[in-house]
Amino acid sequence: TTALMLSAGFAAAEVKFSGSARMGLQHMGSLAAGVPGGPAASRTMIEKRFTLNIDGSTTADNGVTFGARVRIRSDENAGTAVAGARVWARTGGLTVAAGNILGAIESMPGVYTPSVGLTGLGWAGMVTNVTDAAGNSRHFDWDAYSSRGNGAEGMEVIYSAGDLTVHLSHSSDKLRGVAGGPARNTALYGSYKFGDWTAALGFADDTVNSADKIILTLGGKIGDFGVGLAAARNGSGATKINKVSVSGSYTFGATTVNGYIASQSVTPLAAAGLGSKTTYGIGMTYNMGGGARVLAGIERTALKQTRADVGVAFSF
C-alpha cells in the first residue's frame, strides 16, 4: 500500500538519463617561437569524453512544468566532475531558469555552425572567437552551461512563439553573492525561422569591454547543401575586432562534408609575421545509425597552427 501511495504521488514526475561519448585521436601542430604558448612540439594524443545528463521534472496542477539538470563529465585532461544545477520552470512557450544557465550567445542559432571535426578543434570558424594583436585568444567569453562546476550562476528567460525565439540571460557577482564584485554579463538574441532558413541577431554587454558583442547569423538549406553566413563585432573601443565567416556543407547518403573560411579585422602578431587574419577548416561526418557517427576534421588557426582529429562519437 505504501509503495502504491508513493507511486501515485510521483505520477506527474519524471527522471531521465541521457548523454554522449566520443573517442579518437587529435593532433596539434607546433607553434612558432614568439607565439603565446609556443614553440611547442607537434603532438598527437588520445581524445575521449563521457557526458551523462540527469534531468528531473514534474508538472504542477496548474500546468506549469518544473525541472532541473545536473551533468557528470569525464575526459582525458580534467578527470571527472559534476556540473552545477540548472533549475527551470516552463509554461507554454515561456521558460525561466536559474543557476548554471545556458546563456543567450551560447544558444544562438548559427554561432557554432562553422566548426569541424570530432572536437571542434580550435573553434576558429566561430565569429565570436577572435585572436587579438598580441596573439591572445579571446574565445568563449560569454555565459554558457558549464560541464564542470557552477557555471554562470545567473538567470535567463526564453520565449518561443511559432517561428520566433527570444532569449535573454544575465549573470553578475551580485547574483552570485560576491560582495562588491563588479563582474556582469547581459546577453540577448532573437531568431526567426522562415522555411529552411533561420536568421538571428544577438548582443552581449559585459564589464570587460573585449567581451561586448554584436552578432548576426543566417543559415539554411538548398537541397542537399547547407549554407551559413555570420558576422560579429567583438569588443568595443580599442578592443574591437570584427569577424566574418562563410560555411557550407554537402550531404550524400550517410556522409556529410562541411567546411568554412573566416576572416577577422586584426592580424595577430603582424609585426613578427606569425599570425593570419584568415582561418579555415574542413570536416567529414559519416552517420552509422543508432546515434553513432565517425567524424574527422582539419583546421588552420589564426596563429598558423594546424589542428586535426578523427574518431567516433555517439549519443544515448
Image: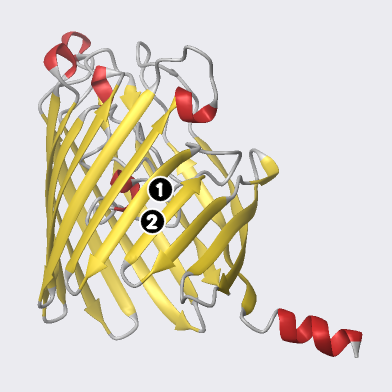
- The residue at 61%/81% (across/down) is 12
Q: Is residue 229 left or right of residue 59?
A: left
Neighbor class of circle 2 (other Cα within 10 Å; few <14, some 14-19, many 20+) is: many
Asked whether the beta carbons under mark 1 and mark 2 sit within 8 Å of each other, the answer is: yes
Q: Secondary structure at mark 1?
A: strand
Q: CA distance from mark 1 to mark 2?
A: 7 Å
Residue extending farthest front: 62
Q: Quadrant of the C terminus?
A: bottom right
Q: Quadrant of residue 271?
A: top left
Residue 154 drawn above or below residue 310:
above
Which residue position is annotated with label 2? 117
Residue occupying image coordinates x 25% and y 21%: 210
> Residue tagged by mark 1?
308
Question: Where does the image place residue 17, in percent across and percent down from the top left?
Answer: 64, 71
Q: Amino acid at mark 2?
A: Gly
Residue drawn at x 32%, y 77% as measured from the top left: 255
Q: Measured from the top left, where is residue 207 in percent x and y? A: 31, 19
Looking at the image, residue 135 sits to the left or right of residue 152; the answer is left
